[in-house]
Amino acid sequence: MTPEPRTAGEPPDASARRTLPRLLARNARDHPRLPALSWQPPEGDGNGDWTTLTWAEIHEHTERLAAGYAGLGVGRGDHVLMMMANRPEHWLSDLALVRLGAVPVSVYGTAAPEQITHIARNCRARVAVVEGVDQAQLWEPLLTDADTPLERLVLAEPGTEGGHVPYAALLREPAAERFAEELDAARPEDPLTVVYTSGTTGEPKGVVLTHRQVLANALALDAVVELPPHVEHICYLPFAHIAERMLGIYLPCHRASHVYLCADPAAVGTVVRKVRPAQFFGVPRIWEKLCAAVRAVLSLMPAEQREVIDAASAVAREHVGYRERGESPPAELEERYARAREEVLLPLLAAGGLDRVTWAASASAPMPVDVVHFWAGFGVVIMDAWGLTETTGVATTNSPRTGFRIGSVGRPVESVEVRLAADGEIEVRGESVFSGYLRPDGSVRSALDADGWLATGDIGRTDDDGYLWLTDRKKEMIITSTGKNVSPALVENALKEHPLIGQALVHGDRRSYLVALLVLDAEAAPAWAAAHGVEADGTVAGLVAHPAVRAEVDRAVAAANSRLSRTEQVKRYELLAGEWGPATGELTPSLKMRRRVIRDKYAEALAGLYGD
């Protein structure tokens, strides 16, 4: 069970007065020796030595760090920008600034210079904390920009300061009486952070979130998620994303749990194998890539071994089916599932470090149903959730405790209400819905209507049991030349059900039919080629041109089309070799597609599919 958030001796309404500094003080008092934060040196690969701080040490360390920031002139209500990987300087600075009454603001490491400039001007920060020389070069022009109030850079990596403030110099003993009065004086209605949207359709907007909103969401999540006390969390997504802010900072403070920092997302698999976490969160692209990797391994196994695994997976899916319907599996099925799990499934999951997972989750974009069914075959039910930065993360979720429907994004958590507008747009209101967007003058522009409802821009439907099913983003819906509405995500997920297709973008707004850009999966394609005796030049690009691969992709597109309406069917496609990612601009740092960027980058190819 997740630990009861209310400490013994607190009045029943104490949660309404909670702030992050009060949680830190509680953890240091009630759980002083419990591990709070672990990390490796920057070159760590997940297998080496880890440094760990307890909750008592976190409390002492962040007080000294807060004194250092106060010495730089940072005070109550000031915004401080941070551009670092998931390293201790980022996590500890975040909490130290909050204890000081300041407002930490994380910036994506992949942010373009114009985005950095926009954010710096919007939040009017005078101090920015960056990782090293590479990041400092992006920020230094702002120090002399008349329209930007930035005055100082703090550099985390030792030996790279170059005239800027070294992070190590911030750790000092607090002395001033005024500092002691200001420390931990945050109120529930004070801003806790500003999270900038990732800018898939325009300039990032600063979402202001208060202590009360964040902790209301934490309490609501605890009501539907059942976890061991002080559960471990592997922190690998950017802190600039609301999911990792909640999972990697705020929920661990709320639950007094243990955070493992993973500075390089590419090493997350190694860290998972070491930690063997009870919970694991991944955006859909992460689960897709894990699925592709496992499928590639399975495809190379002898037929007899695959048959054993397939039989065990069928038992697991049958077991999950009963749970999904809210029914108790028959005793005979329980026995078969226990045997299949112990003898076949757990050893396979243990190889990837997922054998202890009791809560697997995803959010950020619609999850391909075939990926969910694949993991259900291992007894791992991915609890899909939905929410926005503006809803402090999760607004609806599936839950092993209160029920789930595979393919849906669950039911509303206690801190929000959900309704559908006449056109199907999802609207929300409640305790964990944001205050508004930050203006450059420090004021907050509300995006709520007169009754407190937020129009989310997402389209969905609810079923008779109250589960929410996403259709697509309102702005991303394709309207064909015949006036038909098409959800691109629905078509793209159908196309990606074949393991050869790793990524897909469907195009066709104001056109008479749909076309697609398909990206060959870099992990699954070589395994498929080896299993089918296909020889190429050893590269994914070579496989793209191979007739057998093209024929199989033709069959995959035809299979997807057979499950889609005529309007939704893809008539022509282009097969690509290069995977889309944040570094090349096609994905946001949270691995969501930047459709406009992809359409612009492949404009000639898309036009060619229409014969233009």
Image (cartoon, helix red, strand yellow):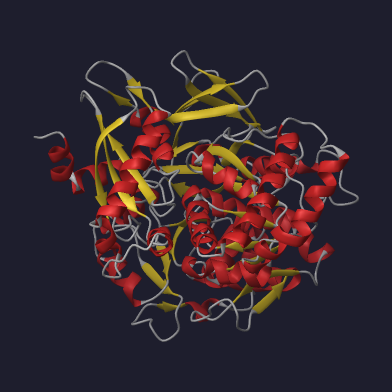
Which one is nearer the viewer's eye here, 523 or 204? 523
Question: Is 198 left or right of 335, judged from the image as shown?
Answer: left
User: Which quarter of the figure has residue 340?
Assistant: bottom right
Which one is nearer the viewer's eye here, 325 or 88? 325
Depicted 10 relative to depicted 69: above or below: above
Residue occupying image coordinates x 28% and y 71%: 137
Query: Farthest residue in the top direction?
Result: 422
Question: Is 213 left or right of 485, judged from the image as shown?
Answer: right
Q: Work out whether residue 4 can be spotted.
A: no
Where's the C terminus, which quadrant?
top left
Query: Farthest residue in the bottom direction?
Result: 159
Residue occupying image coordinates x 25% and y 62%: 541
Q: Work out whether residue 434 can be spotted.
A: yes
User: Which quarter of the figure has residue 607?
Assistant: top left
Question: Is 403 left or right of 42, judged from the image as shown?
Answer: right
Q: Position of residue 487 (x, y in %)?
A: 38, 28
User: Which quarter of the figure has residue 66?
Assistant: bottom right
Depicted 146 relative to depicted 212: above or below: below
Depicted 569 relative to depicted 223: above or below: above
Residue occupying image coordinates x 18% and y 40%: 606
Which one is nearer the viewer's eye here, 248 or 212? 248
Number of marks: 0
Depicted 291 relative to depicted 504: above or below: below
Q: Position of residue 209 (x, y in %)?
A: 54, 43
Q: Position of residue 176 (x, y in %)?
A: 62, 71
Query: Farthest residue in the right direction?
Result: 9
Which one is nearer the viewer's eye here, 131 or 360? 360
Q: Position of residue 163 (x, y in %)?
A: 34, 81
Question: Is 490 left or right of 428, judged from the image as shown?
Answer: left
